[in-house]
Image: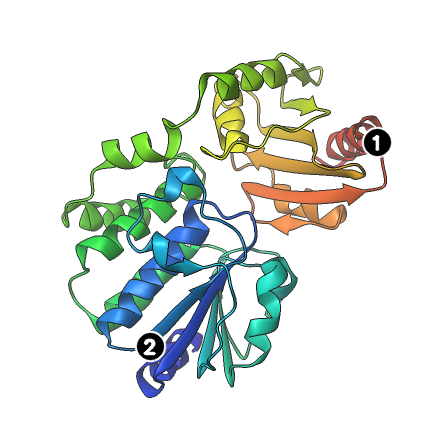
Amino acid sequence: MSLQKIVKTIKNNKSFLLSTHQDVEGDALGSMLAMFCLLRRLRKRVYMYHGQKVPFNYTFLPFSHLIHRMPPHEEFDVGIILDCSDISRLGRSRNAFLKPETLINIDHHTSNTRFADLNLVEPQASSASEIVYKIYKKFFTKIAKQAALCLYTGIFTDTGYFTYSYTDSYVHRVVSELMDYGVSPTKVYHNVYSSFRIQDIAFLGKVISTLSHDRKGRMCWVKTNRWHESVYGDLTEVIFHNLRFIRDAEVFVLFKKVGNNTVRVNFRSRGKVDVNKIAKFFGGGGHRSASGTSIRNSSIAVVERKVISFIKKHT
């Protein structure tokens, strides 16, 4: 079993290189930082490498300041990649992971390509952080307070504040335990989602004003020809949070122009519709309730027409 092999690999090696996917969010950072906490507690040598700056709203996480934007000069026994469906999603960090003798892949995305020597991929898990929690418990009965905060944040964000369909009783038992170590849900929510500027929220309003829907109101979508990236948080999730207030809607789509020739499409579902299958058809991926893809060399109007047509036809 991969879990047992990974535990053995961690025990038998001394140095570890960690990373996660580009455009990091709560679960990517939470799972990586919790793994960092575990390895440090085991007295291993650890280096976290990610080519992008940590978003402002996640700088409250313990040890986030130790995530390096430059590749390491030294070599490592093991590379661990977390919450990443394909090694290409590492971006500029990828080359550093060609060097370790053993590569470990810890993820929960259905679209994961099993690219490593050891692959612990659990599509039924709520998050990569939930999987790291299981690994942590193989070493220690009690979880350190700093690791608990990272794990809680990862699970909290990747379950859509515990609203996605795979938020089962096990997830709540895990979260209950993490709260016993002093995690404050109020503080996590405030740090992650109450950090935006007035102009960010004004932009959000413009996007939501483009709201369209199908005849029965089961699918809703919004779009923007000029995506506004905020250094203070993930506006994508805030937009979806607002769309989920719509009664009877099952599928939500956000179309955003992110470059001169790229349209990013994000999908969310209440659980009945598997949006990973939709994203996969258009070259992307993710998991059942949250997925995405990027389409190049096409206008947002053309992408919108193709995607909406496909969803109507196959759901």
Image coordinates for residue 260, horizontal then vertical, percent: 79, 36
Colour option used: rainbow
Residue at 82 percent across and 28 percent down: it is 305
Q: Amino acid at mark 2?
A: Arg
Where is the C terminus found, in terms of image quarters? Answer: top right
- The local secondary structure at tag 2 comes to strand
- Which residue carries the number 1 mark? 299
Which sits in the foreground, 295 or 191? 191
On the question of residue 315 being in view, the answer is yes
Q: Quadrant of residue 110?
A: bottom right
Which sits in the foreground, 214 or 58? 58
Furthest-top residue in this view: 209
Q: Is residue 108 left or right of residue 144?
A: right
Residue at 61 percent across and 71 percent down: it is 95
Seen in the picture, residue 305 relative to 83 is either above or below; the reply is above
Residue at 76 percent across and 46 percent down: it is 282
- Tell me, for residue 45, which label it has, or none: 2
Q: Is residue 116 left or right of residue 31?
A: right
Where is the N terminus found, in terms of image quarters? Answer: bottom left
Q: Quadrant of residue 76?
A: bottom left
Disc 1 crowd, CA 10 A, few/some/many (<14, 14-19, 20+)? some
